[in-house]
Amino acid sequence: MQTDDRINLLAKVARTPHSPQGEGQTTSDRSILTLAAASYGSRPTDESTVPTGFDPFAAALFESIVEGAYLVATSDGVFDDEERRTFERIVTAACGGAVPQSHVADLVSDLADQLGEDGIDRRIQRLAEGVQREEQAIEVLRIAALIAQASDDVSDVERTVLSKIATACQLGDGAVERALDDVKASLASPS
């Protein structure tokens, strides 16, 4: 079970802007996850008649980020109600309030149904379709690696799912190790 402090730390690391270029490079003040969540959270409802700031590509990216994390979280075959609630809390907190927990819960239900219908390999291919640029692919992998590292022990099956995500997103050799190393470093020294 994850404590509130651990959930908050995971969420903080998830929403921290990431620069894959290395030290000394500047990043925006908002992470890709935060930006995509803001668009996803502004999805128009049936009653919406005014511009909402909704970007369907950003919403698809948000879904891809969450799905990558979800596929890792469920890869061991166990995703009970407690794990599900914790996962939803981490995603909601990582979004900084842009996406209400009820919407995250609905998305997780949809992801569970889709995984059951399509299987993991097809779902990984679908999530990669929502990724348009390399930095987005790196973010999908980084957030999935964060969920894998949440228990401080990345299992072989989680590592396999991360590798499949990296391949589907056309990230090169070593991408999984770089993502895991980045996440470990961020969790060890959250500043």
Image: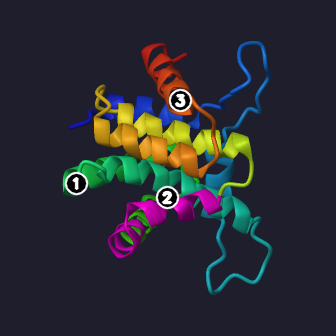
Residue to which mark 1 is pinned: 77
Q: Please tell me which residue lies in front, 88 or 77.
A: 77
Q: Residue 39: which quarter of the image?
A: bottom right
- Predominant secondary structure, magenta span: helix
Q: Which mark is residue 110?
A: none
Amino acid type shown at disc 2: Ile
Relative height, residue 105 to residue 158 (above, below): below
| The N terminus lies in quadrant | top left
Amino acid type shown at disc 3: Ala
The magenta region covers: 111-130
Mark 3–mark 1 distance (CA, rounded to whole Å): 23 Å
Q: Please tell me which residue lies in front, 148 or 119.
A: 119
* Camera sees residue 95: no
Q: Residue 105: which quarter of the image?
A: bottom left
Residue drawn at x 79%, y 19% as measured from the top left: 25
Binning the other alpha carbons within 10 Å of mark 3 as few (below 14), some (14 to 19) or many (20 upward) gives: many
Q: Please tell me which residue lies in front, 59 or 126.
A: 126
Residue drawn at x 34%, y 33% as measured from the top left: 150
| The C terminus lies in quadrant | top right
* Numbered disc 1: secondary structure: loop
Residue to which mark 2 is pinned: 124
Q: Are marks 3 and 2 in contact (CB under 8 Å)?
A: no
Mark 3–mark 2 distance (CA, rounded to whole Å): 17 Å
Residue 164, horizontal then vertical, whole percent: 47, 48
Q: Are marks 2 and 1 in contact (CB under 8 Å)?
A: no
* Numbered disc 2: secondary structure: helix
